[in-house]
């Protein structure tokens, strides 16, 4: 569904991505891991067509998107929904207007039909009765849910999540993780999730990739990542992930983190 | 013979800084003109979203009317007092209405309106768009297949270009009326003579000049406001929004002054209008 081939991207003198290759098959959820500034969000924005690349190819649903004109890119974007880190809801609009925005811009649906879609998408993210509220009146978790409902409004085949649990309390984080998992099951979409939150990563991911210094350090299933013998990857996972997810033995945990299960 | 020290001489350092600054400024001017070209291109690409345009027309026009009227009125009063006092020693104070009306119509009407709107509207456009940029709302528009230039810039550009001449007409009338109030009440000037003089010295060419200037100022305010809003880095944060907003107000004012000079030269000198 998504194929990234030898992608390079730099900002001024800083090389952020240096020859990244990735595959996200249909229906899978790829989690992108890595330290701050390693280019995770840049990669996500490249897939969404928000950033150009210096070299390489990005294929989305069989189309190479990096050389597309805006009009053609907009056709591809109709297959993509994106949840931004800050939810990026339009302040000047109500929740309902936010969710219906894409329908209003690109379809001839009546107000009543759009209203129906809004209610349906809000139900999908377990929210109701907030249609007329403004984004400023919502909590952090509610904003993320509304952002997700907006991303789902056009029935996308691909959903991109940019740090979906950042800034939320642990209970809300868990709810958002469950929501992402449920949506992926219900809607059979292909997802790419950028996160620092290891609980979230292991909770939603069916595939994982670790970026380090602009390169792909490791790629595979969550199980294979846990067993990968790479000190940088192991330290990153073990420092952030709850022990019950890893089911890791005491000497390994101590070796990479200095931490004990007891 | 080469100096053994690798440190560049101070003059070279200054030259390097100036070169960098010039490159940066030229690159910004280039980007601003690119945005302007894209905006003009998008104006002629249907559909034009009238609801967005109406919202901006109301915000820019109706909400600025009172401040423009007050500014115009007091500018006219000042001109009336100054004109009368300056002309009286030469016994030509009877020309004060001509002085006020010609100054207000050709120069101060569009200029004062543009100054008021550059502070009120230009800065507000920059603050709004730059906040949308740092909170990823502009990225969200892109991802949802909506061109941010068409959705955000075009309505603001059109509204400013249309409302600035409209407000200038109000400001000009307020200015002429301000002059009337000042000279009639403070100096006992004959009101009927004032009105007669204004009618005799107001030509359609002067009104045309006023409207051409106002439209150009409106375009400049919107273009600078939108460019400064869009050009902020996503990581700029609140500080970036503040810097962009201040920069927008300053650049708008300078652009209006430069544009006024250029237009005066073209309209009065090259085209011979009066």
Image (cartoon, coloured by chain):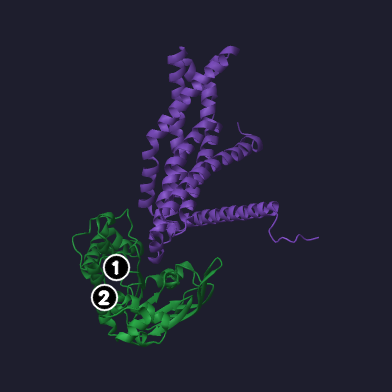
Q: Which chain is green?
A: A
The residue labelled by disc 2 is A183
Image position, residue A238 (x, y; %): 34, 79
Neighbor class of circle 1 (other Cα within 10 Å; few <14, some 14-19, many 20+) is many
- Is residue A65 positioned above or below A97 on the image? below
The purple one among the chains is B
Residue at the image position 46 percent from the left and 55 percent from the top: B230
Dot 2 and dot 1 within a common chain? yes
Q: Is residue B153 above or below residue B118?
A: below
Q: Residue at x 51, y 43 (%)?
A: B250
Q: Quadrant of the C terminus of chain A?
A: bottom left
Is residue A22 left or right of B267 when viewed as pictured?
Answer: left
- Label 2: chain? A
Q: Which residue is mark 1?
A: A148
Label 2 crowd bin: few (<14), some (14–19), many (20+), radius 10 Å: some
Is A257 or A196 nearer to us in this picture? A257
């Amino acid at each position: 569904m998504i194929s990234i081939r030898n992608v390079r991207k730099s900002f001024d003198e800083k090389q952020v991505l240096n020859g990244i290759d990735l595959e996200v098959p249909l229906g899978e959820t790829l989690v992108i891991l890595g330290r701050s500034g390693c280019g995770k969000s840049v990669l996500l924005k490249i897939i969404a067509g928000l950033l150009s690349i210096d070299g390489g190819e990005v294929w989305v649903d069989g189309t190479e998107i990096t050389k597309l004109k805006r009009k053609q890119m907009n056709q591809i974007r109709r297959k993509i929904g994106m949840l931004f880190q800050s939810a990026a809801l339009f302040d000047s609009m109500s929740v309902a207007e936010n969710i219906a925005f894409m329908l209003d811009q690109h379809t001839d649906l009546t107000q009543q039909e759009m209203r129906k879609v809004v209610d349906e998408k809000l139900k999908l993210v377990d929210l109701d009765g907030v249609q007329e509220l403004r984004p400023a009146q919502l909590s952090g978790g509610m904003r993320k849910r509304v952002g997700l409902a907006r991303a789902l409004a056009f029935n996308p085949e691909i959903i991109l999540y940019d740090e979906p649990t950042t800034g939320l309390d642990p209970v809300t984080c868990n709810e958002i993780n469950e929501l992402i998992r449920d949506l992926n099951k219900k809607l059979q979409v292909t997802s790419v999730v950028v996160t620092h939150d290891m609980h979230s990563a292991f909770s939603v991911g069916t595939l994982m990739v670790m970026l380090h210094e602009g390169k792909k350090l490791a790629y595979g299933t969550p199980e294979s990542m846990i067993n990968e013998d790479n000190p940088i990857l192991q330290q990153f996972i073990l420092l952030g992930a709850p022990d019950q997810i890893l089911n890791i033995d005491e000497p390994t945990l101590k070796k990479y983190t200095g931490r004990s299960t007891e | 013979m080469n100096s053994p020290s690798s440190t560049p001489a101070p003059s070279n350092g200054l030259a390097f800084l100036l070169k960098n600054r010039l490159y940066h400024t030229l690159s910004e001017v280039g980007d601003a003109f690119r945005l302007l070209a894209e905006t003009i291109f998008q104006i002629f690409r249907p559909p034009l979203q009238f609801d967005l345009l109406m919202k901006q027309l109301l915000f820019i026009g109706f909400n600025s009317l009172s401040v423009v009227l007050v500014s115009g009125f007091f500018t006219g009063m000042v001109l009336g007092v100054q004109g009368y006092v300056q002309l009286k020693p030469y016994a030509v104070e009877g020309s004060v209405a001509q002085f006020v009306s010609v100054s207000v119509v050709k120069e101060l009407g569009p200029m004062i309106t543009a100054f008021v709107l550059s502070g009120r509207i230009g800065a507000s456009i920059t603050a709004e768009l730059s906040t949308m940029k740092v909170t990823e709302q502009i990225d969200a528009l892109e991802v949802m297949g909506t061109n941010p230039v068409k959705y955000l810039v075009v309505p603001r550009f059109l509204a400013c270009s249309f409302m600035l001449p409209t407000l200038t007409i109000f400001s000009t009338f307020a200015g002429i009326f301000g002059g009337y109030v000042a000279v009639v009440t403070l100096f006992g000037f004959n009101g009927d003579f004032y009105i007669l003089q204004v009618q005799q010295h107001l030509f359609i060419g002067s009104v045309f000049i006023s409207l051409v200037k106002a439209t150009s100022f409106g375009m400049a305010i919107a273009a600078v406001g939108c460019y400064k809003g869009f050009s902020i880095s996503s990581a700029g944060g609140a500080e970036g929004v503040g810097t962009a907003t201040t920069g927008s107000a300053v650049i708008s004012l300078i652009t209006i002054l430069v544009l006024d000079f250029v237009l005066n030269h073209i309209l009065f000198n090259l085209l011979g209008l009066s």
